[in-house]
Image (tube, rainbow, N blue to C red):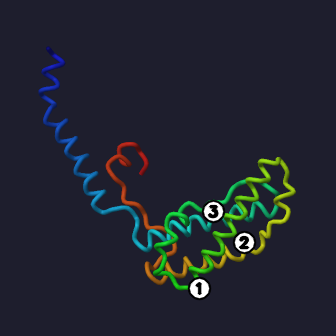
Amino acid sequence: MNVLNNIQENLPLIIAAIILVVVQNFLKRRRGPAASQPGLVQDLLGEVRYNLGLVNVFSHQYQAKRFVATMWKLDKDKLDFLPQPLQESLSNAFAMVEDFNQQIAVAKKQKSTAYMAGLNIDKLKALLTTCQEGLEGWLLLKVGSKNPPLKAPDMFDNLLGKR
């Protein structure tokens, strides 16, 4: 009975906490995902930077690590707001990334680095650098910063010590 009385005494606090979590999730969904133009550019820029890091490692040693093109595959049809030369550079760079990924997959399957010796890493690096500069320039022009905006902490970040 003592436990039942404690639950009844704390029931308003429990209900208030549940309502707070539901309201916060509703407001977060209402704002929507980062599908805005700067959000798309930030996602692509992250992939370009990651792939540039892989290119730098790849140029020193043949390491069979696949390049990333997830955001490109998802958002390539939504980038008509970018300048045409930047769209072409992105398209060429990620087409090359896809080709490299296929060659890396074949090399892994055959357990041989001979398939990766013919990869033109310098051309990919030049294309990715052009894409990075173009995306950063677009962000500077439209947003005023080339780095992603800080995410506002939510209630769980404070509770779990992520802030």
Residue 111 is situated, as x and y percent measured from the top left of the image, at 82, 47
Q: Nearer the viewer, mark 3 or mark 1?
A: 1
- The secondary element bearing badge 1 is classed as helix
Residue picked out by circle 1: 85
- 144 up-or-down from 76: above or below: below
Amino acid at the residue labelled 1: Pro
Q: State how far apart marks 1 and 2 are (Cα).
A: 16 Å
- The secondary element bearing badge 3 is classed as helix
Say whether residue 93 is left or right of residue 4. right
Residue 81 is situated, as x and y percent measured from the top left of the image, at 46, 81
Amino acid at the residue labelled 2: Leu
Q: State how far apart marks 3 and 2 are (Cα).
A: 13 Å
Residue picked out by circle 3: 50
The tag on residue 124 is 2
Say whether residue 31 is left or right of residue 138. left
Label 3 crowding class (10 Å Cα cut-off): few <14, some 14-19, many 20+?
A: few
Residue drawn 82% across the image and 48% down it: 110
Residue drawn 77% across the image and 49% down it: 108
Amino acid at the residue labelled 3: Tyr
Q: Nearer the viewer, residue 158 or 43?
A: 43
Residue 15 is situated, as x and y percent measured from the top left of the image, at 17, 38
